[in-house]
Image: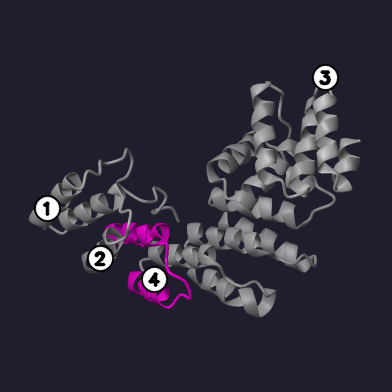
């Protein structure tokens, strides 16, 4: 009945029925989580999954697919990694065994493969998705561009980005632009990445600029790194990561005086160094 109500769009009634069940097994929990995902109640789906864990109800591969779909839609990266690791560690060939694949399940698989650095496998699933007549959406293309970024696949990444509107009628959003900046930064095309930012139809956010700043540190481009850092520090809410990265860029170039001055400026502004803020993105060196 939970499945029936959910499929008909009666999610409130499905939840009421679910709450009335006194002893809920994993089938019951999974049916409700799946219903929430299919009705675009992603936050509620994740909330219910956490409740399921607190009740010590065992999770199966179908629960994992549902939760990964919600994570993919919401960008809940850490939880998505945990769930995908669960699937991987249990050797569950969930996706391959699914008979009724849809855009959500493809998005889930492509996102999971991208998270684990399996770039070519993600691209393979994307091509299968398109060949089977499914139309990729914004979430699909963010996942695919992330896969290209993690694999350092610049030519494929640019081809995907340039085909978004022309082939799939999907207008690039800041997340898609961010993936290209990240990709260019990973392969050392820093000046090109900055020009790409300058030509975007929207203002870059601090995450995008921070990722490029981190790439400048890794590739030793002090001049551009200094330019980006000053742009970030001029924003309303500069954070400690910017100060630390700029200081490290100066230090790695032997400019110890400038490095010390940046650290002192950070202390004077009352911004403390956060744990683990040496890099904006710890995975920057992953291909």
Q: Position of residue 235 (x, y in %)?
A: 31, 60
Q: Position of residue 259 (x, y in %)?
A: 14, 53
Residue at mark 3 to residue at mark 4: CA–CA distance: 56 Å
Mark 2, secondary structure of its residue:
loop
Give the residue displayed 57% in from the left and 39% down from the top.
79
Residue at mark 1 to residue at mark 3: CA–CA distance: 63 Å
Reading the image, the residue beneath label 3 is 22
Residue at mark 2 to residue at mark 3: CA–CA distance: 62 Å
246 displayed left or right of 81: left
Residue at mark 2 to residue at mark 1: CA–CA distance: 19 Å
Reading the image, the residue beneath label 2 is 221
Are the residues flagged by discs 2 and 3 in contact, CB closer than 8 Å?
no
Mark 1, secondary structure of its residue:
helix
Residue 261: which disc?
1
Question: Would you say residue 63 is visible in this rendering?
Answer: yes
Query: Considering only order in the chain, which callout, 3 or 2, is on the residue closer to the N terminus?
Result: 3
Task: Give the foreground label among 4 and 1.
Answer: 1
Q: Is residue 208 magenta?
A: yes
Are the residues flagged by discs 2 and 4 in contact, CB closer than 8 Å?
no
Residue at mark 2 to residue at mark 4: CA–CA distance: 13 Å
Task: Give the foreground label among 2 and 1.
Answer: 1
Task: Give the foreground label among 3 and 4.
Answer: 3
In magenta, the rendered stretch is 190-218
4 and 25: which is toward the camera: 4
Question: Would you say residue 27 is visible in this rendering?
Answer: no
């Amino acid at each position: 009945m939970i499945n029936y109500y959910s499929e008909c769009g009666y999610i409130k009634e499905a939840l009421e029925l679910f709450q009335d069940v006194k002893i809920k097994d994993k089938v019951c929990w999974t049916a409700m989580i799946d219903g929430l995902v299919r009705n675009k109640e992603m936050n509620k789906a994740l909330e219910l999954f956490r409740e399921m864990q607190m009740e010590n109800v065992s999770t199966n591969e179908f629960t994992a697919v549902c939760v990964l779909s919600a994570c993919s839609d919401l960008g809940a990266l850490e939880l998505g990694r945990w769930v995908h690791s669960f699937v991987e560690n249990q050797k569950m060939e969930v996706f391959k065994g699914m008979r009724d694949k849809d855009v959500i399940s493809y998005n889930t698989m492509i996102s999971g493969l991208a998270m684990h650095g399996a770039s070519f496998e993600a691209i393979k699933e994307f091509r299968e998705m398109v060949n089977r007549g499914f139309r990729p959406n914004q979430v699909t293309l963010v996942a695919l561009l992330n896969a290209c970024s993690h694999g350092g696949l610049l030519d494929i990444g640019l081809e995907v980005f340039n085909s978004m509107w022309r082939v799939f009628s999907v207008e690039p959003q800041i997340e898609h632009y961010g993936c290209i900046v990240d990709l260019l930064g990973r392969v050392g095309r820093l000046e090109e990445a900055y020009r790409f930012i300058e030509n975007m139809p929207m203002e870059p956010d601090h995450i995008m600029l921070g990722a490029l700043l981190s790439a400048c540190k890794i590739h030793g481009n002090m001049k551009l790194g200094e330019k980006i850092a000053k742009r970030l520090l001029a924003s309303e809410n500069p954070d400690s990561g910017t100060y630390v990265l700029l200081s490290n860029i100066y230090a790695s170039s032997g400019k110890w005086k400038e490095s010390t001055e940046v650290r002192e400026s950070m202390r004077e502004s009352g911004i403390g160094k956060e744990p683990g803020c040496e890099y904006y993105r710890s995975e920057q060196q992953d291909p």
